[in-house]
Image: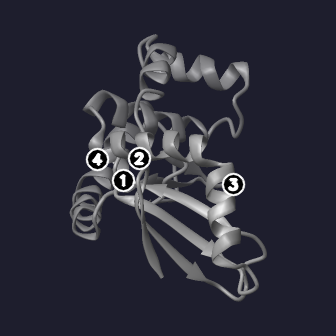
Amino acid sequence: MTYSDPDFGTITVTVNPRARRIIMRAEVDGLRVTAPRYATLSDVKNAIDKYREPLKLNQEKAKLHPHHTDEEIAKLRIMAKLQLPRRVAELAHLHGFKYQGVKIQSSRTRWGSCSARNSINLSLFLMQLPEHLIDYVILHELCHTVHHDHSNSFWALMMKVTDGKAMEWNNELKQYHTD
């Protein structure tokens, strides 16, 4: 069911029998609500009114960082698979790191990770970053093949492989988001 709201535009309400509570997600063009089967429309409207201000803020944030379309994600995935494994190999060779393999994923919560077996996982959304920050993330994960933590030894290695720019680039990376 959908209805119009002066603040959010279109509100789409979906009933999910597995839902245990009313869940509201602000989107660029409206509000998406998932409700348990026992919730009435009045319950949904009351929940929206209760959280109206924070939801409006979330909608503004969504407008600043809109989600990617499936087509955009497909293009990013192709670019990432072509470029990132080659760059990991280049940087690993240059700095003497050994790793097991590279996986490209659509992770939205982290830029990369390194498994206990030294397999590097990278988000396809890295392709939206400036080149030096892509290298920073790759080097960060390669350093985890030596130090599987964020100890002083890890950061000393990061400073060495980034010519002393690790902290600067780490702070710069915080300005970017996967969406």
Labelled disc at residue 28: 1
User: 55 and 18: which one is in front?
Assistant: 55
Q: Quote the CA–CA distance across marks 3 and 1.
A: 39 Å
Q: Residue at label 2?
A: 62
Above or below, 81 relative to 14: above
Q: Residue at label 3?
A: 116
Q: Earlier in the sequence, mark 4 or mark 2?
A: 2
Q: Secondary structure at mark 3?
A: loop
Q: Quote the CA–CA distance across marks 2 and 1.
A: 5 Å
Q: Earlier in the sequence, mark 2 or mark 1?
A: 1
Could you tell me which residue is drawn at 26 percent across and 58 percent down? 76
Q: Residue at label 4?
A: 127
Q: Quote the CA–CA distance across marks 3 and 4.
A: 25 Å
Could you tell me which residue is drawn at 61 percent across and 39 percent down? 144
Q: Secondary structure at mark 2?
A: helix
Q: Nearer the viewer, mark 2 or mark 3?
A: 2
